[in-house]
Amino acid sequence: MTEIFFVLTVIYAAYVIYSVASDSKKVKIIDDSAPAMMSVTTSVKPLIPEKAMAQPLTKPVTKAAKPAVKKNGLKNPKTGEIVSSYANYRFMKRWIKEALVAEGLLEKVYKNNELNAELEVNIKDAISQLENLDNYKI
């Protein structure tokens, strides 16, 4: 019980010290010996000539035709789902793995423990072939 009371006291003391330290940073000391705010009038000359101020600062924006950007990704022909990230076979969507097998690009859907370097190369080639098929293009 005394340990809990001691811990709570230390936490409270740290909080008090922190709040006092942060409040002292916020308070600004005003020097009473300084004269009150003086009013000073000066003439200010603008940096930009009046002719330039009359002209609009921005140019009119003309819409240019954007070139067609080829979207990377695969589209599921059954559901219409579009997947843009499929570089790693371990994290690839199940329907992509099944599409690789259905199109005859791979023998079967491989498990993660069956993957090796040679098989990864074959999978990359199969994915590039799948991207070229019309059913799976975006």
Image (tube, rainbow, N blue to C red):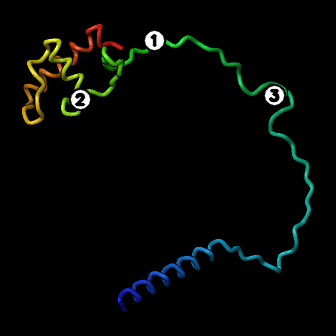
Quadrant the N terminus occupies: bottom left
Instruction: Check disc 2 and give the amino acid type.
Output: Met
Which comes sooner in the sequence, label 1 or label 3? Answer: 3
- Place of residue 9 in the rendered image (x, y in percent of width and height, measured from the top left): 45, 86
Compared to residue 24, the image places residue 56 above or below, namely: above
Residue situated in front as seen by the camera: 59 or 107: 107
Secondary structure of residue under mark 3: helix
Which comes sooner in the sequence, label 1 or label 2? Answer: 1
Q: Real-space Cα distance between discs 1 and 3? A: 39 Å
Q: Are marks 1 and 2 in contact (CB under 8 Å)?
A: no
In the image, taking residue 42 as reference, residue 58 lies left or right, namely left
Q: Which residue is mark 2?
A: 92
Instruction: Check disc 3 and give the amino acid type.
Output: Ala
Secondary structure of residue under mark 1: loop
Instruction: Check disc 1 and give the amino acid type.
Output: Ala
Secondary structure of residue under mark 2: loop
At 14% across and 14% down in the image, what residue appears? 105
Q: Which residue is mark 3?
A: 52
Q: Which residue is mark 1?
A: 68
